[in-house]
Image (tube, grey):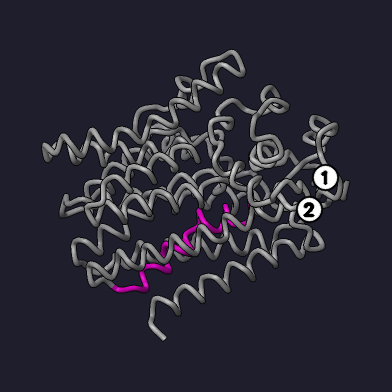
Amino acid sequence: MKKEYKIIIIVGIFYLIYILLFMAKFDFNPSATIELSGKHINRYNSILPSNLVVQIDSEGASSHSYYMMSLDPSLEKVKLSLPKIKLQRILYPLVANVFAVGNTNLIPWTLFLINYLSIVISTYLVILLLKKYNANLNLAYLWAFNVGYLITAIRDLPSPLMFLFVISSVFYLDRKRIYLATLFFSLALLTKESSTFVILPILLYFLFKKEIKSVAILSLSFLPFLVWSVYVSSLIGDIVLVKNYSNVTVPFMGFIKYLVFFNFEQPVKDIFWNLLPLPVMIFTFIQFFDIKKYAFYGYNLFFQIFFQFIFPLLPYRTIDIIGRHAMPVYLFSILYYAESNRKYNYLLAIITILLSVGYFILKIIIFDVNYYIT
């Protein structure tokens, strides 16, 4: 069997076991990944089906927004009860709704199955990119098991689908098929607008190379997102697009805040949880000094590092937030080392592995929560 297929089988089996181990804490009810809280139930009770896991003494998570949108992709019923920024991220809940073929009881299944398949397929595309540069295919494991995927695989978040589209775009750009790349970038934007921070440096790259036609074509990927944003803004009577990233700050300000305000008097479990983001920032910071070739992936890696440090990290000190935001850095770090024909930095590999192992321990071994079924 070819090595790429062995990698895909291992990744697929791992995530299947990982998801099942998490669901086992909730009697294998698939709605556990929605992370509904009592607060959410009180807010949406009139439009929710039965047999949903509700976590007691929990604030829940943003994944509930995508579940609500998948119940109502037109957003007519939920438009005023969800965070405005989430309403722009329509593609993931829409696909979940379509795959459920009108059966709302299937939506908890389709939400995490979409993410499962997205992780497996995107890993395969990364393998194909690595093969082109004759790189070590084992680097695909670093992508497949990065902490961002471990977070989103057991939470109904749009990042896996977004990265499937992003990697598909990069894959076709690498093969000079710019129209297909534009199509997948447009799908990535409709899945999550933060894919802008992948598209912008690519546009700049082609602009600096004076490939104006490529810039013009790739810029078309923003059109579907802009149309949807106008629809959402008209629906809720407020402009959503310009308010999304009001928390952007000067580089490293969030890093400084994290170090200054970290509370070392927390219980041991909380300290462990809040220390985990620090290796993510170290992983990102190291690469400022390790980029030696500004080719396509190196150029993009530099900008992903920059973007990672323009967002304040407080009050979001947990790995849940920072680990997901660092996913573009993981991606372009791997592809940069492949493109520049260099062995992957051992320290970066060790940090990546330790982060994933730490999160696995937190969610599968340590994590414990009371819940009830509606």
Q: Which residue is mark 1?
A: 56
The total number of labels drawn is 2
Q: Give the image location of residue 65, x and y in percent.
A: 66, 37
Query: Mark 1 is on which residue type?
Result: Ile
Label 1 environment density (alpha carbons within 10 Å; few <14, some 14–19, many ≥20): some
Q: Which residue is mark 2?
A: 369
Q: Which residues are magenta?
A: 136-155
Label 2 environment density (alpha carbons within 10 Å; few <14, some 14–19, many ≥20): few
Which residue shows up at 54% across the image and 36% down it? 89
Which residue shows up at 30% across the image and 54% down it? 172
Circle 1/circle 2 CB separation < 8 Å: yes
Residue 153 in the magenta stretch? The answer is yes
**Which mark is on residue 162?**
none
Q: Give the image location of residue 157, x and y in percent.
A: 59, 46
Q: CA distance from mark 1 to mark 2?
A: 7 Å
Quadrant of the rendered structure where residue 94 is?
top right
Q: Earlier in the sequence, mark 1 or mark 2?
A: 1
Query: Mark 2 is on which residue type?
Result: Val
Which residue shows up at 45% across the image and 32% down it? 312
Q: Give the image location of residue 260, x and y in percent.
A: 48, 35
Label 1 sits on a secondary structure element that is loop
Q: Is residue 243 above or below residue 306?
A: above
Residue most toward the front?
101
Residue most toward the top?
237
**Residue placed most toward the observer, 74 or 46:** 74
**Residue placed most toward the observer, 60 or 109:** 109
Quadrant of the rendered structure where residue 331 is?
bottom left
**Residue placed most toward the observer, 306 or 239:** 239
Which residue shows up at 34% across the image and 50% down it? 169
Q: Is residue 244 above or below residue 344?
A: above
